[in-house]
Amino acid sequence: MAEGMMGDPMGAQQPPMEQPMNTPMGGAEDAVLDMHLTEDVKKALSAKGIDVSAVADRGPKEPVVVIPVSIIMNKYQGASPEGLGAPTPMDRPPMTA
């Protein structure tokens, strides 16, 4: 790890998450759980009476930031939802050796 990142938890790499034995990995649902099912969300669901034991080991182990697409769209007026995160077309031919 880089010396400047030793005390910075945001700079630390997170180990891959282990999957429960009875849950197949893959699909959009798993990606959503792994990105957004934080400890706070699990506590909130449990407080509402929802059993989260089946996904207790899913989700990030650190706080996350969720930004609605509308905020990004308002900030960057020229962006389109399809273009957010999508590769941009090349403006020039590829470099060759």
Image (cartoon, grey):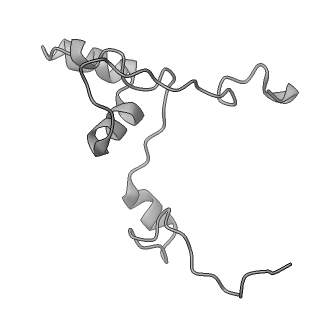
Q: Residue at x 49, y 78 (%)?
A: 78
Question: What is the count of numbered marks?
Answer: 0
Q: Residue at x 59, y 26 (%)?
A: 14
Relative to 90, residue 17 above or below: above
Relative placement, left or right, of 67 versus 95 is left
Q: Residue at x 86, y 78 (%)?
A: 97
Relative placement, left or right, of 6 versus 76 is right
Relative to 18, residue 93 above or below: below
Relative placement, left or right, of 58 versus 78 is left
Which of the 4 image quadrants contains residue 96? bottom right
Relative placement, left or right, of 23 versus 38 is left
Q: Position of residue 26 (x, y in %)?
A: 32, 39
Which of the 4 image quadrants contains residue 54? top left
Q: Residue at x 52, y 69 (%)?
A: 76
Which of the 4 image quadrants contains residue 9? top right
- What is the quadrant of the N terminus in the image? top right
Q: Position of residue 62 (x, y in %)?
A: 51, 23
Q: Position of residue 23 (x, y in %)?
A: 25, 25
Q: Position of residue 48 (x, y in %)?
A: 15, 17
The single residue placed furthest to the front in the displayed view is 97
Front residue (pair 76, 25): 25
